[in-house]
Every structure is written in C-alpha cells, then in structure tokens.
Amino acid sequence: MNWFAKTFTSVAGRKLIAALTGLGLVTFLVIHLLGNLQIFMSGNELNDYAKSLHDGPLIIVGDVGLLVMFPLHIIMVIWLIIDNNKARGDKGYKVTGTKQKRGFAAVMASKMMPLTGLGLMAFVVAHVLHFRLRHSEIGYDLKGDIIVELQNPLWAITYILGSLLVSWHLFHGFQAAFRTLGTSHPRYMPLIQKVGVGLSVFLALGFTSIPAWILLQGGHS
C-alpha cells in the first residue's frame, strides 16, 4: 500500500486524484443532463427513466461513485490550494508571465476556481436535499415534481445560477485536468480546450433551459 500513501502525500498524486475525480464528475453531469432533458418530451419518458434508474443497480453505483468522487475532489483541491499557498511563502509572489497563452476568460476562471468551487458545493448540497433525498416523497412523478418546484421563481433562479456556476467551474477545470494527466502538448491542447468550452456551453444551456422553460410556460408542460 506504499504507492497508495505516496499518492496522497505527494503534490503530483493529489493533482492526479483531483483530475480523475473531476473528469468523473463531468461524465456524471453529462449523463445526468441527458436524462433530465427528457422533461421536454410530451409523455412520461422522464418518469419512466427515473423509475428504471431507481429500480436497478445503477442508482447505487451512481450514489456510491458520487459519495467517493465529490468529497475526494473537494479535499484534494483544498489540499492543493494549501500546498500552493505554502510554496509561495508568507509574503507570496507575483506571477508576471506564463508559458500558456490564455485569454481573459480562462485566466479569470482559473483565479476564481476556489470561489466557484465553494459556490458549487453549496449548490450541489441544496440540489441533493431538494430532490435526491426526497425520492420516496416524490415517487415516480419526477417530471411533475420538477415542474411544481421550479414554478417558484426563487428555486428557478437558484438552479439557473447554479448551472452557470457549474459550467464556469468546468471551463477551467476540464483543461486543468488534462494538463495534469500529461496532455499539455501544442498538438492536443487546442482540441481539448475546444471540447472543454463545448462541454461548458452544452451543460450551461442544457441545465438552465429546464427552469427557464418552466418559468416561461407558467408551470404547464
């Protein structure tokens, strides 16, 4: 188990864990969104999807995966922030240049990662309390419950802002994860950056479209 201990006690190991758990969470978000987008269908597709999911083993796999990846990702990122602060010393230092050519948005996303991460954590906790832990109360009318809940402008706006926060966090995090995995090469990074931007936009438009649509429809599907 020596390699296991070294992974957690080395900066490189913590970066690797943060990268892998981050990419795992991105995969979950894409799958989660594709399932939720069935709310736009006129029938009971979303409810049928929810029933098949909760009646099968995948929900257990998903819950266990999230319970492992999400806290582990947070712990590793916080640990890395502490590592960076220690490396800078008491007075810190100013970075006047970088080998990476990044635009203003990418730089701001990078600098705001700790702040957006805290906001994202609060949003995820609220989402879990709002829907996941109320599954027995909701039953299998997930579509109806989502519509009723998001008729409330406060909840709708919360989900819109939370979804935008997820996408903003991903905007930098996706690229950073692949750099950690050793793909920071001039041949590959432009494509990885484009994929990261595409995923960010897809998740932003996908997740925000649901509460926005419900508000515009006045709660009627």
Image: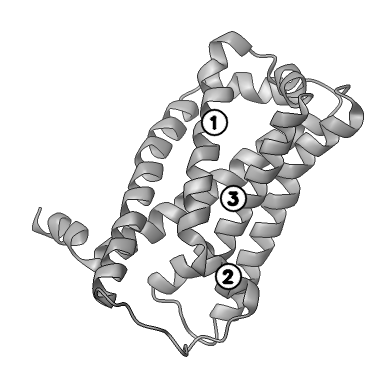
Task: Using the rendered image of the protein, determine whether residue 82 is visible from the camera's viewpoint.
Answer: yes
Label 2: how many Cα within 10 Å (few below 14, some 14–19, many 20+): few
Neighbor class of circle 1 (other Cα within 10 Å; few <14, some 14-19, many 20+) is some
Choose the circle earlier in sequence order: 3 or 2. Answer: 2
For disc 3, the neighbor class at 10 Å (few under 14, some 14 to 19, many from 20) is many
The residue under the point 24% across, 75% down is: 89
Residue depicted at x 90% and y 29%: 217
Label 1 to label 2, Cα distance in Å?
A: 26 Å
Which quadrant holds residue 134? top right
Asked whether residue 192 is in view, the answer is no
Question: Position of 175 compared to 212: left or right?
Answer: left
Q: Name the residue under label 3.
A: 166
- Expressed as whole percent of the image width and height from the top left, the position of residue 35 reads 67, 35
Answer with mark 1 or mark 2, whichever residue precedes in sequence.
Answer: 2
Q: Which residue is disc 2 drawn over?
A: 108
Which residue is farthest left? 2
3 or 2: mark nearer the eye? 2
Q: Are marks 1 and 3 in contact (CB under 8 Å)?
A: no
**Mark-to-mark CA distance, 3 and 2:** 15 Å
Q: Residue 14, image x and y in percent?
A: 28, 61
Looking at the rendered structure, the secondary structure element under dot 3 is: helix
Tag 1 near tag 2, CB within 8 Å: no
What's under tag 1, amino acid-wise?
Ala
- Give the amino acid type for the residue marked by disc 3 in the picture: Val
Query: Residue drawn at (20%, 57%), measured in percent from left and top?
Result: 8
Q: Identify the image quadrant of residue 42.
A: top right
At label 2, which amino acid type do we have? Answer: Met
